[in-house]
Amino acid sequence: MFHPKYSQIATVNGDIVGAILVSMESSLTIARIRNLCVLPPWRTHVGSLLLHGFFNRIKGGTQIHTVYGAIYPGVAWLESLAGDFGFTEGQRMGEQVVYTRRWEATAAGDESSEPLEVTLTPLTRENLQHIQSLEAESLPLKYSAAFYERLFADHMLVRLAKVGQEVAGSLSAERIQSERYGDFVYLKNLCVRPTFRRHRVAESLVAWLLEHVKQSHNALVAIYAHTEISNKPVLAMATKMNFRIIGFAPDQYQRPANPHAYALCWCKPGRNHPLPLTLLRTFLDNRPAGSVNANIESERTAKHNGPDSKIFFEDWEVVPA
């Protein structure tokens, strides 16, 4: 019997292109990947997407400590994924080879250290200076002074986090209007000073944003964001807070060592992910000049509005199987 929480399918424009089917052993501490099947054109990215989603779910407070699956020898793309995700090759099971990954189970919550008392304050001139200094210190991308000045256009969606008198983190988002799909929020930057990471500072900032959107009028339906595919702490936190990985964005970032990103979406209770991902890209590329980083946006436009722009952002969605 496949487990409904951990089994998922992946679709492209409504067509199923892959699935991961998972069952649980009787102890509920061991999960078996019964099948990871992806159509050939999508194997590299969709296979990774499905496994990321699966591992983020089982790390969200479960007692699972072992995951295993069996692969026929010579299935190169599955063997490669198994290596990428830390599986160890083991003994044979009939004609297949068993691959296993083990780790220490974590208690409900996450792998973070003791949570700290975090105070969130709105955007002010003084706080803007703190945000600039924090992001210059902690983020791989560098933003102009004009970018930070434009945060005042959506000042209600910006927060500075402090622990005591020390600046610990910041969040900046913007509202994007759409008559057809409903207004939504795009989470631009989430930054935590390295010394305060794994103390739930980021979680406090995102929880505030979720509550803000929940309390807004009905036209505001969802929050979208991107994060590097290698950013496991953010992916684990996002899954815990009911964001869904809904797509893959190659070359989303211009400067980090890993430029590829996952697209994430959180919706108000009772609402669905309303926006095709190709349109999300269009919205972000056509925001008013007062709400974007002109330098970074011009790079994206030059790179992705050419004849090959259709390959930039596939309309992927991962849903329960």
Image (cartoon, rainbow, N blue to C red):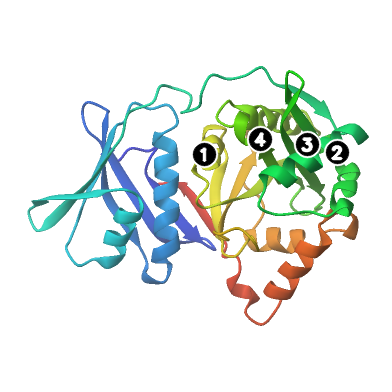
Label 4 to label 2, Cα distance in Å?
15 Å
Q: Secondary structure at mark 4?
A: loop
Q: Secondary structure at mark 3?
A: loop
Of the residues shown, which amino acid type is indicated by label 4? Answer: Arg
Name the image quarter holding residue 272: top right
- Which residue lies under the disc numbered 4? 193
User: What percent of the width, then of the height, locates residue 108?
Assistant: 44, 22
Q: Residue furthest left?
A: 94
* Structural distance between the alpha carbons of marks 2 and 1: 27 Å
Q: Nearer the viewer, mark 1 or mark 4?
A: 4
Name which residue type carries label 3. Asn
First in sequence, mark 4 or 2: give its number: 2
Q: Residues within 10 Å of mark 4 (few under 14, many from 20)?
A: some
Looking at marks 4 and 3 on the same chain, the residue that comes earlier in the sequence is marked by: 4
Residue behind mark 3 = 218
- In the image, what residue occupies the spot 66% across and 17% down? 117
In front: label 4 or label 3 = 4
Image marks 2 and 3: residues in contact by CB distance under 8 Å: no
Numbered disc in front, either 2 or 3: 2
Question: What numbered label is drawn on residue 233?
Answer: 1
Which of 273/156 is in front? 156
